[in-house]
Image (cartoon, rainbow, N blue to C red):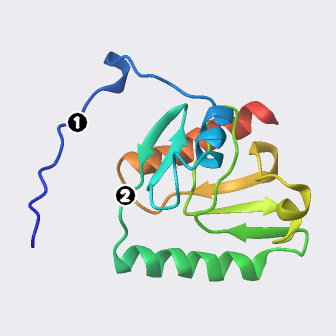
Amino acid sequence: MTLALTPLPTVDLSTVDLFRISVEQYHAMIEAEILTTSDRVELLEGVLVYKMSKDESHVVAEESVSDAVEKQLPNTFSYRSQNPITLPDGEPEPDGAVVRGDRRTYLREGRKPGAADTFLPERLQSGVLSAATSFAGRQAGRQR
């Protein structure tokens, strides 16, 4: 069966009343399995936003960036691909980010990287999801 998808109209979110949730509420929804890994959403500035699908060119670009960046990093930093960064008002999952520490740092510490731990969050897609980079960048600027 083939489904025909109709694009939704663009909405100026500044004119819409949104119910915003906190990072703590978002984490509680995950813990209670209200949101699961099959729910393709992330929390951006207190709003749950659908993640967009990726085509193969995006995957290749993402892996190429990852390979290039990882080769340049000292042992005290690592590159995370499509993993959450906890900010005061959201938990974006940028295509890539340089973070302090090795791959196990945040597992040992029982947390996700925050704005103060994160450098160069990036989005390789255009459109709505590219806004997550500006969210993370603004938050990182506020935290430093």
Q: Residues within 10 Å of mark 1 (few under 14, many from 20)?
A: few
Residue type highlighted by circle 1: Thr
Q: Residues within 10 Å of mark 2 (few under 14, many from 20)?
A: few
Residue 137 in sight from this viewpoint: no
- 86 or 133: which is nearer to us? 86
Distance CA(mark 2)–CA(mark 1):
15 Å
Q: Residue at x 17, y 37 (%)?
A: 9
Q: Would you say 67 lies left or right of 75 here?
A: left
Residue 76 in sight from this viewpoint: yes
Q: Would you say 38 lies left or right of 102 here?
A: left
Q: Residue at x 32, y 17 (%)?
A: 15
Q: Label 2: which residue?
A: 52
Q: Residue at x 79, y 70 (%)?
A: 78
Residue 140 drawn above or below residue 124: above
2 or 1: tag closer to the N-terminus: 1
Q: Label 1: which residue?
A: 10
Residue 101 location, x and y as percent? 88, 64
Q: Secondary structure at mark 2?
A: loop
Residue 78 drawn above or below residue 67: above
Residue 102 location, x and y as percent? 86, 70
Q: Residue at x 62, y 43 (%)?
A: 136
Residue 70 location, x and y as percent? 72, 78
Q: How many marks?
A: 2
Residue type highlighted by circle 2: Met
Quadrant housing residue 116: top right
Image quadrant where one finds the C terminus: top right
Residue 34 location, x and y as percent? 52, 45
